[in-house]
Image (spheres, rainbow, N blue to C red):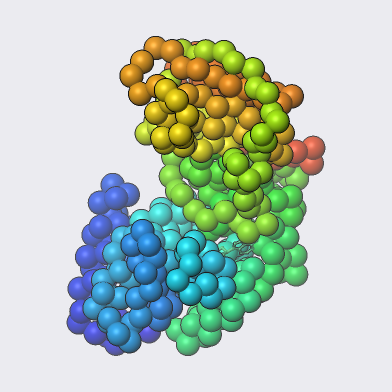
Amino acid sequence: MKTTDLAAAERIAIRELLGAVNDEMEASVAPEWERAAWDVPRAAFVAERIYLGDELEPCDRANAPEAWLRAVYANDSVVTQVNDGADLGDGDRRASSSASAPSIVFRMLHMLDVRAGLKVLEIGTGTGWNAGLLNHVAGPGNVTTVEVDSKLAAEAAKRLRREGGAAHVVTGDGAEGYAANAPYDRLVSTCSVRSVPRPWVDQVKAGGVILTPWESPWICYGLLRMTVDDMGCASGPFSPYSAFMLMRNQRTDLRIFRDVVRDDHQPDESTTSLPPWRVTGDDLAAQFAMGLQLRDVWWTRQDDPDVDGVASRLWVATTDATSWAAIDWDGESDDRWTVWQHGPRRLWNEVEAAHAWWVLHDRPGPERFGLTVTAKGESAWLETPDRPVPAAG
Ligand SMILES: C[S@@+](CC[C@H](N)C(=O)[O-])C[C@H]1O[C@@H](n2cnc3c(N)ncnc32)[C@H](O)[C@@H]1O
């Protein structure tokens, strides 16, 4: 669609959105991406039904066109699918596909350094909007995009065709990349990963870039930008952005009482002086550093756990559900917490060690860390690849 075809309300909305993106990025959207934003309007890609608010209430374009357009041109993600497309009626809704927030979309497009003629692989087609933007700059025939959900892939392909985009949409598991169109100059994922799939490194040319949201079971936070070398390795720094949906085949669904803690467990009791909220609270840099060191550990908080003298309990557990720790706060003290630990690993001791290491190194944020992927696996580092981050467990 060309600028002249856009209705007045949409033109105003796009202008305001670009302003909001500039404010959020603290930089101007580059001219080629600004042109793409006008020529590939977000509204042409977002589904007719979206889901709004904490409860993910459905909002249909046909019934509420103004609310729909407002959501589509807000600088926010728009949920376009829940529960992997399963119709659960009034049951709980969990977002399973969305159009990512425009400021992170454009931030990532800038970081990807796409130019005309470069071959790009996108993982996570979703609505197809990002593929449409990529296609606008990289040029026809240069963009391949992989979506695991066949219905979403078919809808995105239709929208891309309608809007004149020539991106090649593939239904499949993005963890496999898409070997048929390799090698690529750029690979960008719009779902997060807990480990970088090896085919991504194999399918990107030496000197090419892999950009992906990253997460640990501890926290979903961090964007990883790696450059591939001519030895088949990839390496590069994190930056402190993003909170994306986890790639479907890397999901874990664990619950403390269903999967981890059993009535016959007899945990050891001790105390700690590390406040539980220091490693699970607002300090995202602390959380990121915990996740980088404790790659198989997650946490959940239980308020009013119905235990005498306990106001709040932090649970920490391994993803194989064999070790756990519970840290109790009585609601008053601010220097001592009771710790219960069970299983082959003493998880809270590991958390204390990980936190102490982070403090010792001046509390680095994600931008001071990086990751290297080789044929042997992944290793995280601080500042430079020769300074490994200690891995617990
Ligand atoms: C945040 S959305 C993508 C947004 C999209 N780029 C856009 O412009 O609308 C993440 C997408 O990743 C998809 N996804 C999840 N796991 C995947 C996998 N293993 N392979 C490919 N796509 C996957 C989800 O179905 C979802 O549509």
Q: Is residue 258 above or below residue 45?
A: above
- Location of residue 370 in the rendering, given as x and y in whole percent from the top left corner: 57, 34
Residue plotted at (63% across, 59% down): 248
Q: Nearer the viewer, residue 213 or 11?
A: 213
Q: Is residue 142 above or below residue 370?
A: below
Residue plotted at (24% across, 78% down): 66
- Location of residue 293 in the rendering, given as x and y in whole percent from the top left corner: 60, 28
Q: Count up the numbered dots.
A: 0
Q: Nearer the viewer, residue 151 or 330?
A: 330
Q: Residue furthest right?
A: 376
Q: Specify the quadrant of the image occupied by residue 186.
A: bottom right
Residue plotted at (29% across, 64% down): 74
- Relative placement, left or right, of 330 versus 172 is left
Q: Specify the quadrant of the image occupied by residue 323.
A: top right
Quarter in which the N terminus is drawn = bottom left
Ligand 1 in which quarter: bottom right
Q: Nearer the viewer, residue 26 or 176?
A: 176
- Location of residue 235 in the rendering, given as x and y in whole percent from the top left corner: 63, 39
- Relative placement, left or right, of 344 versus 39 is right
- Location of residue 283 in the rendering, given as x and y in whole percent from the top left corner: 39, 31
Quarter in which the C terminus is drawn = top right
- Relative placement, left or right, of 198 versus 39 is right
Q: Specify the quadrant of the image occupied by residue 346.
A: top right
Q: Is residue 254 above or below residue 248?
A: above
Residue 180 visible, this orientation = yes
Residue plotted at (66% across, 38% down): 260
Q: Is residue 390 above or below residue 34?
A: above
Residue 280 visible, this orientation = no
